[in-house]
Image (cartoon, rainbow, N blue to C red):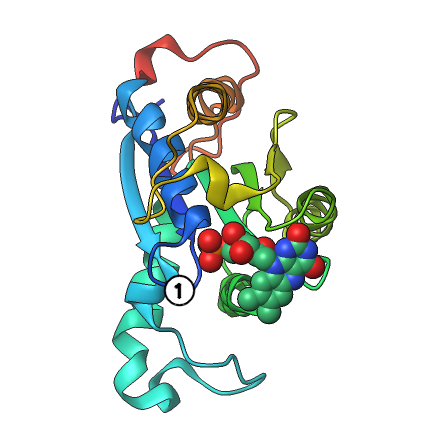
Amino acid sequence: MRNERLNVVGVGGTLREGSTSLGALERALRAAGDAGAETEFLDLRGLGLPMYVPGRALDEYGESAADIGRFLEALRRADAVLISTATYHGTLAGVTKNALDFMQFLARDERPYLEGRVVGLIATAGGDQSALNAIGALTHAAHALRGVVAPVTVAVPRARRLADAEGNTTDERLGARLDQLGRLVVDLAARLGYDAETEERQLAPAAGRR
Ligand SMILES: Cc1cc2nc3c(=O)[nH]c(=O)nc-3n(C[C@H](O)[C@H](O)[C@H](O)COP(=O)(O)O)c2cc1C
């Protein structure tokens, strides 16, 4: 069993300045860090992934190849992944889905896609209803990617009322739930205790890794 700290990667946000889904992700990721994990933040706006093209090799993505490679390497190192999306037209935003599609590059890994990683889900929405639909769609995608979806998810209706102009979560109740999710993915990842080097799995808490 390795003794390094668990690694939690946060992927999300929209291309909009002041993204609430990005702010919510930052909050949950911070809680994961406070729970003892190493964290890595993959802001989709900053990353600027191009559209995924099936069959195109990584080096055929030109200037974007390095960013795509950075994205994939972060996922390969992850013990848990937090994914945060906006809700567009009743489901997850295209920028999020496109990022998930790039995980096709992980298909032939020893641990393909998100296998063995805990996945924590967050969705923000403008209205009252759709964030839950986005969580549902993300759950299907995370299962297809062989992730282990955490039983606490965070669906945020009327998200802009609960955030400042920069997208940071200002609502205490929402913040507490995001903190809970951040802590939970660390705890679940420790319990799954998958070690890629030894291919060892254990279901008891892996205290040595925290
Ligand atoms: C193209 C588009 C479609 C949207 N569709 C929905 C929708 O179906 N339901 C909803 O509640 N909000 C919808 N919204 C509002 C966004 O979900 C909301 O503004 C969310 O906070 C955006 O995430 P962000 O703050 O991370 O950019 C839509 C926004 C855009 C730009």
Q: Is residue 12 above or below residue 95?
A: above
Judge left or right: residue 13 versus residue 17. Answer: right
**Up-down relation of residue 68 to residue 38 (above or below):** below
Q: Residue at x 56, y 86 (%)?
A: 55
Q: Secondary structure at mark 1?
A: loop
Q: Residue at x 33, y 61 (%)?
A: 17
Instruction: Kindly identify the amino acid type of the residue bearing the numbered disc 1.
Output: Arg
**Dot 1: within a 10 Å radius of its alpha carbon, few (fewer than 14), some, or many (20 or more) residues?**
few
The residue where tag 1 is placed is 16
In the rendered view, does 96 fall on the left or right side of 25?
Answer: right
The answer to whether 133 is drawn above or below residue 180 in the figure is below
Name the residue at 38% across, 38% down: 197
Q: Quadrant of the N terminus?
A: top left
Q: Residue at x 53, y 23 (%)?
A: 192
The verdict on label 1 being within 8 Å of ligand 1 is: yes
Residue 152 in the image: x percent, y percent? 61, 25
Quadrant housing the C terminus: top left
Quarter of image, ligand 1 = bottom right
Q: Position of residue 29 (x, y in %)?
A: 35, 34
**Numbered disc total:** 1
109 vs 105, nearest the viewer: 105
User: Which residue is at the front of the view, 98 or 104?
Assistant: 98
Task: Find residue 30 and report its image quarter.
Answer: top left
Q: Is residue 155 visible?
A: yes
Residue 80 located left or right of residue 122: left
x and y percent of residue 72 in the render? Answer: 39, 61
